[in-house]
Each structure stands twice: as C-alpha cells, then as structure tokens.
C-alpha cells in the first residue's frame, strides 16, 4: 500500500498529473508521480515550511533507529511508522461524492440565505481558510443544483409520502405584501396508518401580479397543474382561504370566515369605529413624537411608579390589529389620561374607556379560537364545538353588556354574522362526521336530526368497509389510561368545558335504534358508550390505542385528515424575504417557486440525515 508523503500538507492534486501549491497557487507536473519536484519547490520558495518538513523527516529517522536498536526482530518490525502523517483530507480523493455532498449542503444553506451570500468576500475567505481545496461555484451552479437535482429528490419524496396516505385533504392559501409580491401555496394533510399526522407542501408559486385576472388564472390552475399525480378518490376535501376561494363565495377556511365576521361587525358599528379612530390618533401621536413618547414613559415610571408599557401600532395586514391597538391604549389608561390633560390631546371619556374594556372581553374568545384553528394539528372536528362555544359567549355578552349600546350592538352583529357564515357546519357531513369521530366531542353538540345523519353515514361507510374486507378482526378492549392534564385557563376553554359537562348526549337513546343484530351496529353501540376523553388528549392516539375499533380506522383517517384552516402561506412568506430579493436581482419566478417548495418540506425531508 502506498504511503502518503508529508509534503502533501502543502499541495493538493489538481489532476492526476498536476499538483497545486496551497501557499502560492503554482502548478507543478507530476508525470513521474513523485514528490521530489514538490519538495524542491518548498525548499526554494517556502524555506520556513520546508524546514518543518525536514524536522519531521529527522524525527522519523530518529524514532526508527531507536526502535530498531531496542526491540527484537518481529515480522512487523519492517513496517514504517507514519507518525508524521496528518489525517486524510476528505477532498483529496479521486471520488467526487464528497465534493458533491459539500455542494449540496451549501445549496441547502441558501434556502435561508440570499444567493449573493456565497459571493461575499468574508464567506469566500472563511471557506478558503477552512478548506483550501473546496472551490465555491457560481450562484447559477447552486441554483441549478437546488432547482433540478434537489427538487427532483423532493418530488420523489412527496410522491412516496402521499402513497402512504389513504386519504388527503388539500388547502390553498395566498399571502401578499403591499408591494404586490405574494406566495400561493397548495398544502396536503393526511393521517398515516400508524396515526401520525402529515403535512406536506405540494406546490408553491412566487407571484407578483398587479392584475387580478392573472392571479385568478394562477389560482384556478393551482390544483390542475400539480406535477404529482394524486388520485381523485384520495382527496377528501379542498379548503380555500379568503383569497383563493371561488369568486362570490365564502372561504372554506374557518379562520378566514371568523375574521370576516369580525371585520363586517366592526364596519357596521360607527360608534366603535370612531372610538378606534381616537385610539389611532393617540398611538400615531406618540409614534411620531419622541418627546411625547419620553414624557409618557416618565409619567408611567415616575409619577405612577409602574413599569412602562408600549402602545400597539395599527397594522392593516393583521386581522385584529384594531382591537390589539385599543387594548394597548386601555392598559395605559391612567398615563394617557394625564398626558392628554396636560397637552390637550384627543380625549377619551369615561364611558368610552368602559367600551374599550368590554370590547376586549367580547373579542377574547374570537382571538383564542383563531389561535386554536391556526394550529396545523387542529382538525375540522373542533369547528362545530368552538362555534357553539363562541355562540354561547356572544349571547351572554349581549345580555350582560346591554348598558353599553356600542358593545351590545357589536356583540349582536357578531353573533348574526357567526350564525350566517357558519350555518353550513351543522349540515355538512364532513364537519358532522369529523366531530363524531373525535372522542373528545362525539355527539355532544348534535341535534336529533344531526345525530341521525351521522348514524346513517357511519353505517353506510362501515358496511362498505365490511364488505370489502375478508372479515372483522376480533374485538379487543384497550382502555386509555386516564391521566390528569393541565387546563389552559382561557375564556373559550372555560365555556367549552362547561358545555361538555352540561350538554346531555343521550347516548342510549341514540344507539338503541341501531339494534344488536350485526357486528357493525354493536361496534357503534360500543363506541357511543365510551366516555368522552379529556379535551387535552390527542384523539389520534386514542384511536391508535383502541384496536377494537380497527374496522373504523379508514373512515377516521379520512375525516380527521382535514385541517380546520388554511394558513400555510403567511409564515413561509414572512420567513423568506431573501428569496424575493433574489427575484428582484434576477432569480426567475419558476426557480424561486421550486426553492420555496424545498424549503417548506426541508425539515421533514432532511432532518433525519
């Protein structure tokens, strides 16, 4: 076996016959495959480095002589000691796989950084010191690596993941900024056979359309132009947000529907709008006046001896920005009142302060529900229960806040909008089935008509499953251990818990109509007789643990696959400002869309490497 000379710590192989000096970048021929010319170059051009090389040689000779004189002859005595040899360089090999892997890792790093980063002198110099033999390629090289090789691998991975899912739910979402740049996404949600939730981004499109007609065409072709072949029978439902919904129709996304309820209720309440305008004038005053801001801070800390708070500015892109702004003004009520008296700023009267406080209380359940629905793990099974809880809260507010004309009118209008925009959930079998198959809720929020609709649908689906299967597996009872969970103290949680405690499910009356003549009806009777689990428990883990209901698994995975909302674009858009900078610098929209897709799925695809 050939041994690596210590001279190679100052050279690297440019090719089979050429070596390059790492110190001065000169090339030398190695036709004879020897290192004499390289050693002579060090001696003449880099004497200090050659001196260290010579000292290593002398030290090696000394060690060899001492071992030869003191040790008896042994078959291994003829072996040379390579104490001078450094660890092998991973790039000093004829195999290009290591260099290609470095290229791929650097390309993946550019998912979170602009392409101009690899051209920065600081990064180039750092890599040159860290590994002189690695050559940083052009930005086009890494762009092609991402948009061809890595994108192809990602598409293959997505295809494998979809094949593992019995049913999927698609959701479309669009987010844009004031400059017109936006991101259109198509997300897939599903439950695998081991009852693990999966969320995959199937398509991303970076768009910058000033024309609404062009955007409409892009939205219309989002699903038909999907590069992956998804069988239609696998698709359970399609959830569209407010922008991607069909023109003239309401969005399928529960979050956007509730936001529309709040927006329309505010627009119809002139008194509340005038009050929010006052709050905005106050916030804008302190945002534009450094002296006013400092004096307000002085009032809080010195005169009122409390910690200084910050005012929340108005953001038109945030659905509840008006209410957050008003709440921040109310938190600084005393300090702002003192300041307004001293400087003759717009006055908020005592009755108006009460309205601001009551408005925050009316809005609290709405904000809590939207936060719950925006969680990717929340499914459509929570829509009916949370709408019922919000309805109960608003009815209580209308009764309790009758002394405030402004807030009572706002709560009543919000209740009307809620009843109108969510009236479909009690007749849509997808919502009813999802709620029933969630062991946290089952039939708690159903009327007799809704119970019968669900019962007929479950019997029909289970009959089909039973006919397609070779036989029903034996019933096996696996109880879920009851453990205590920490209750999240919030207004909506309290309302929902009270409703689940007081609502009469009348399980016996509902299930006796099924009879006990078939195994399917007995299975449903058994499921309906099970006590509801705690709301903080994972319904999927409950199903996984109760193998006795395995014949229901296919319909459970189907109806619980749909998320409550479509909110994928916003977070990905806000995490990727560098990509839009690259688009302005010349990155084509098609490649940017591919990079968005890789980035959105990167954590699931590459985190286990």
Image: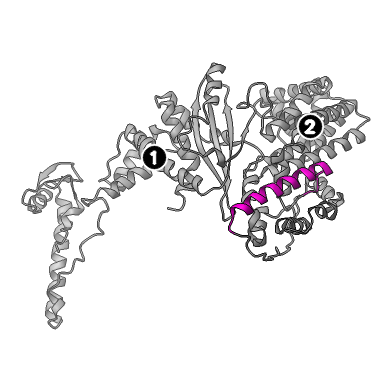
Q: How many numbered circles does the render carry?
A: 2
- Circle 2 Cα neighbour tier, 10 Å, few/some/many (<14 / 14–19 / ≥20): many
Instruction: State which quarter of the image contains the N terminus.
Output: bottom left
Q: Position of residue 138 (x, y in %)?
A: 31, 33
SS for callout 2: helix
N-terminal of the two: label 2 or label 1?
1
User: Which residue sits furthest right?
Assistant: 403
**Residue at screen point 30% across, 45% down:** 100
**Res. 120 visible in picture:** no
Residue 148 visible to an observer of this rendering: yes
Q: Quadrant of residue 15?
A: top left
Task: Specify start and end residues of the magenta stretch as a single range.
Answer: 443-470
Secondary element at image label 1 = helix
Mark 2 near mark 1, Cβ–Cβ under 8 Å? Answer: no
Q: Position of residue 299 (x, y in %)?
A: 77, 33
Residue located beneath label 1 in the image: 152
* Viewer-proximal residue among 309 and 608: 608
Disc 2 marks which residue?
418
């Amino acid at each position: 076996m050939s041994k690596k000379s210590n001279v190679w710590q100052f050279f690297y192989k440019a090719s089979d016959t050429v070596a390059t000096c790492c110190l001065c970048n000169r090339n030398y021929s190695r036709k004879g495959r020897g290192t004499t010319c390289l050693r002579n170059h060090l001696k003449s051009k880099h004497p200090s480095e050659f001196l260290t090389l010579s000292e290593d040689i002398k030290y090696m000779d000394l060690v060899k002589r001492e071992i030869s004189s003191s040790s008896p002859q042994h078959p291994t005595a003829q072996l040379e000691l390579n104490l001078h040899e450094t660890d092998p360089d991973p790039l000093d090999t004829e195999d290009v796989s290591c260099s290609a892997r470095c290229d791929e890792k650097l390309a993946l790093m550019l998912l979170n950084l602009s392409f101009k980063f690899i051209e920065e002198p600081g990064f180039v110099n750092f890599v040159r010191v860290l590994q002189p033999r690695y050559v940083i390629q052009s930005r086009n090289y890494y762009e092609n690596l991402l948009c061809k090789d890595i994108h192809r691998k990602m598409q293959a991975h997505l295809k494998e993941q979809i094949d593992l899912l019995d049913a999927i739910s698609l959701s479309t979402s669009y987010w844009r900024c004031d400059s017109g740049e936006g991101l259109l996404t198509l997300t897939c949600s599903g439950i695998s056979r081991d009852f693990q939730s999966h969320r995959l981004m199937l398509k991303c499109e970076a768009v910058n359309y000033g024309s609404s007609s062009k955007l409409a065409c892009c939205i219309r072709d989002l699903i038909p132009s999907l590069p992956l072949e998804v069988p239609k029978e696998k698709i359970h439902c399609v959830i569209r947000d407010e922008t991607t919904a069909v023109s003239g129709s309401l969005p399928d996304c529960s979050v956007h529907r509730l936001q529309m309820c709040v927006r329309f209720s505010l627009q119809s309440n002139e008194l509340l709008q005038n009050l929010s305008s006052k709050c905005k004038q106050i916030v804008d005053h302190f945002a534009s006046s450094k002296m006013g801001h400092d004096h307000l801070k002085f009032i809080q800390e010195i005169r009122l001896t409390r910690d200084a708070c910050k005012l929340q500015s108005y953001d038109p892109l945030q659905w509840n920005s008006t209410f957050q702004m008003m709440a921040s003004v109310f938190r600084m009520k005393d300090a702002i009142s003192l300041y307004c008296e001293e400087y003759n700023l717009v006055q908020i009267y005592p009755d108006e302060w009460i309205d601001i406080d009551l408005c925050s209380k009316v809005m609290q359940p709405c904000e809590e529900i939207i936060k719950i629905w925006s969680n990717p793990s929340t499914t459509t099974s929570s829509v009916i229960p949370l709408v019922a809880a919000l309805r109960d809260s608003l009815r209580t507010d209308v009764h309790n806040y009758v002394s405030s004309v402004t807030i009572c009118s706002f709560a009543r209008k919000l209740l009307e909008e809620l009843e109108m925009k969510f009236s479909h959930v009690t007749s849509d079998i997808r919502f009813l089935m999802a709620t029933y198959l969630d062991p946290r809720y089952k039939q708690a929020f159903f009327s007799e008509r809704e119970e019968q609709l669900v019962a007929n649908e479950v019997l029909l689906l289970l009959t089909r499953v039973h006919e397609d299967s070779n036989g029903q597996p034996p019933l096996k009872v696996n109880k879920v251990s009851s453990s205590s969970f920490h209750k999240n103290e919030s207004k909506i949680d309290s309302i929902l818990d009270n409703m689940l405690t007081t609502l009469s499910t009348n399980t016996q009356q509902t299930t006796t109509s099924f009879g006990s003549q078939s195994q399917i009806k007995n299975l449903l009777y058994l499921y309906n007789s099970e006590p509801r689990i705690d709301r903080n428990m994972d319904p999927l883990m409950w199903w996984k643990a109760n193998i006795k209901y395995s014949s229901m698994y296919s319909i459970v995975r189907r109806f619980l696959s749909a998320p409550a909302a479509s909110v994928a674009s916003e977070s990905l858009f806000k995490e990727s400002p560098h990509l839009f900078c690259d688009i302005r610098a010349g990155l084509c929209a098609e490649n940017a869309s591919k990079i968005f897709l890789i980035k959105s799925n990167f954590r699931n695809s590459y985190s286990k490497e």
